[in-house]
Amino acid sequence: MPMLRDPERGTISFSMTQQLPHPDDLSDAELAEQAHAWRRLALRGDRTARAPAHAYETALRERVRASMAAELMASASAAGPEPKRPWWRRLWPLSDERVTS
């Protein structure tokens, strides 16, 4: 039976008949902790911990991707369009200072 260790509440035990917390019911920090704890158990050889570890890690990746996409969309809309420049202008710095050596 997989055992999770929670420093504040002691040992939490789950059997195959007990329901695990759904990833949508957990905060980001709790989800990361669950994913880490289950993966740690799976890496120690507990085969029953593989599925929960995979499920929590997948939910965590999806949540991180969604939040990063939202941040990118917000920053892109706030920045506005980039001014049009000739293609060759990208090869040189934006300043007109010339390097003399």
Image (tube, helix red, strand yellow):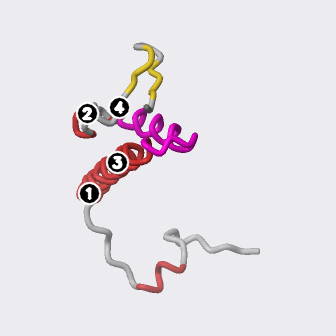
Above or below 97: residue 56: above
Sequence-earlier tag: 1 or 3: 3
Badge 4 element: loop
* Residue identified by numbered label 2: 19
- Mark 4 = which residue? 15
The residue type indicated by label 2 comes to Gln
| Callout 1 touching callout 2 (CB < 8 Å) | no
- Which of the two discs, 1 and 4, labels the residue nearer the N terminus? 4
* Quarter containing the N terminus: top left
Write the residue at 47% across / 86% down.
Answer: 88
Between 74 and 69, the one lying in front of the other is 69
The span picked out in magenta is 30-48
Q: Which residue is mark 1?
A: 73
Q: CA distance from mark 4 to mark 2?
A: 8 Å
SS assignment for the magenta stretch, majority = helix
Image position, residue 74 (x, y; %): 25, 52
Which amino acid, mark 4?
Ser
- Point out the tag, 1 or 2, that comes first from the N-terminus: 2
